[in-house]
Image (cartoon, grey):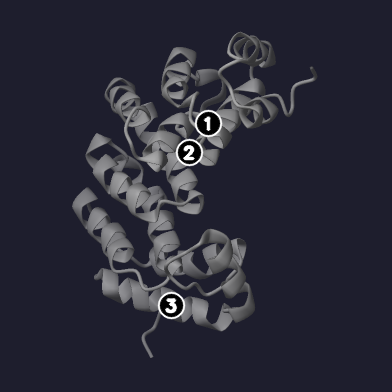
Amino acid sequence: MTNPFRPHRSAAGVRRAVHEALTPLADPERARGVRRYLKSPLPCFGVKADDFRRAVKPVFARLSLPDAESWKALVLGLFRDATYRDDWWAATLLAGDRRARAFQTMESLPVYEEMIVTAARWDLVDDLATHRLSAILRRQPREMKRTMRTWSRCENLWKRRSAILCQVPMKKETDLDFLYAVIDPSLGSKEFFLRKAIGWALRSYAWTDPTEVVRYVEKNRSRLSGLSIREALKNVGV
């Protein structure tokens, strides 16, 4: 049996180690429920999120990530050749490895774009949007805002959602003009995941400035969906 703590250098080796780490924790009944809920084309092990991270992180800890290209190769190798949805989750976790902080630049955005478009489901998209895209936005705001504005108007639902959510962790650093700019193209959409994203993004900023969120909602009430309004004002005493 392959030792999951050996410093694997190939994505295939890492994948085998991840599977071996997860197999003892697998819950087939939970796996079936998760797969139905996510409408996943791939099976999964059914491991709870906290247990998943505890099992997978030691595998990653022994990896060598000397440069951005090595890191990208492992992340995309795990993702592209996935046989379980857990491989996608593992790739997302590796993408956020602390050793990869310096790699969170516009040059890495095509990696995340591929993952977002391929996964096409909130369980991966939201993590990438709120953590990885936000990291690039902090590092290269001008270039990233330009690209996110383009994403916010594109045909792909998940890229639009990602553009809306990329400022969620930013609190007082939120650029309101940018936030409203990426929300605006989706205000008339009937897509649940866009309406939900709009509400989530506004609700997140409401913790910082509830008055501003109330003002925005009132000004755009005729354009906002009921779902977006409810989500935006969920923690606001109005």
Q: On the picture, is 128 further left or further right than 140?
A: right
Residue under circle 1? 168
How packed mark 3 is, by other alpha carbons closer than 10 Å (few <14, some 14-19, many 20 or more), is many
The alpha-carbon separation of the residues under discs 3 and 1 comes to 32 Å
Q: Residue furthest left?
A: 69
Q: On the picture, is 189 further left or further right than 99?
A: right
Dot 3 amino acid type: His
Dot 2 amino acid type: Thr
Can residue 186 be seen by looking at this rendering?
yes
Q: Secondary structure at mark 2?
A: helix
Residue under circle 3? 19
Pinpoint residue 35: horizontal percent, then vertical percent: 53, 67
Closest to the observer, 82 or 222? 222
Closest to the observer, 2 or 147? 147
Dot 1 amino acid type: Val
Pinpoint residue 12: horizontal percent, then vertical percent: 28, 74
Residue at 43% across / 45% down in the picture? 128
Q: Quadrant of the C terminus?
A: top right
Pinpoint residue 101: horizontal percent, then vertical percent: 36, 43
Q: On the picture, is 117 further left or further right than 228?
A: left
Pinpoint residue 181: horizontal percent, then vertical percent: 42, 17
The correct choice, above or below, for 143 with respect to 194 in the image is above
Q: Secondary structure at mark 3?
A: helix
Q: Are marks 3 and 1 in contact (CB under 8 Å)?
A: no
The alpha-carbon separation of the residues under discs 1 and 2 comes to 6 Å
Q: Secondary structure at mark 1?
A: helix
Residue under circle 2? 130
How packed mark 2 is, by other alpha carbons closer than 10 Å (few <14, some 14-19, many 20 or more), is some
